[in-house]
C-alpha cells in the first residue's frame, strides 16, 4: 500500500514539474503578443498626437 502511495506522489510531482515549465512555443507566443501590444500602443499614441495637432488647428501635413 505504501509503495502505491509513493508511486502516485512521485508521478504527481513529476507531472506538476513538467506541466509548469514554459515551452519554447509558449515563450515565442508571449514575445509575439508583447510585440503586438507595443505596436498597438505606438499606434494609439500617434493617433492621440494627431488628434491634439488637429485640435490645435495646425494644418501642416505630417509625414
Image (tube, helix red, strand yellow):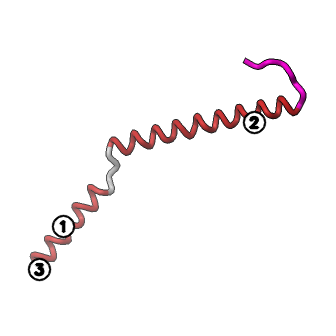
Which one is nearer the viewer's eye here, 18 or 58? 58
Q: Position of residue 60 (x, y in %)?
A: 84, 19
Which one is nearer the viewer's eye here, 50 or 9? 50
- CB under 8 Å between callouts 2 and 1? no
Span colored in magenta: 56-63
Q: Identify the residue at horizontal 24%, vertical 65% (top origin).
A: 13
Residue 56 occupies which quadrant of the picture? top right
Q: Identify the residue at horizontal 23%, vertical 67% (top origin).
A: 12
Residue that numbered label 1 is attached to: 10
Q: CA distance from mark 1 to mark 3?
A: 12 Å
Which numbered tag is attached to residue 48? 2
Q: CA distance from mark 2 to mark 1?
A: 56 Å
Q: Does residue 29 belong to the magenta stretch?
A: no
SS at badge 1? helix
Neighbor class of circle 2 (other Cα within 10 Å; few <14, some 14-19, many 20+) is: few
Name the outermost residue toward the right: 57
Q: Identify the residue at horizontal 33%, vertical 41% (top origin).
A: 24
SS at badge 3? helix
Residue that numbered label 3 is attached to: 2
Which numbered tag is attached to residue 41? none
Q: Is residue 28 above or below residue 21?
A: above
Left/right of residue 38 with respect to residue 21 in the rendered view: right
Amino acid at each position: 500500500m505504501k509503495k502505491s502511495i509513493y508511486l502516485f506522489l512521485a508521478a504527481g510531482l513529476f507531472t506538476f514539474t513538467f506541466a509548469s515549465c514554459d515551452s519554447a512555443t509558449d515563450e515565442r507566443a508571449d514575445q509575439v503578443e508583447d510585440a503586438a501590444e507595443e505596436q498597438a500602443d505606438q499606434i494609439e499614441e500617434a493617433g492621440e498626437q494627431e488628434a491634439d495637432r488637429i485640435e490645435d488647428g495646425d494644418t501642416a501635413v505630417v509625414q
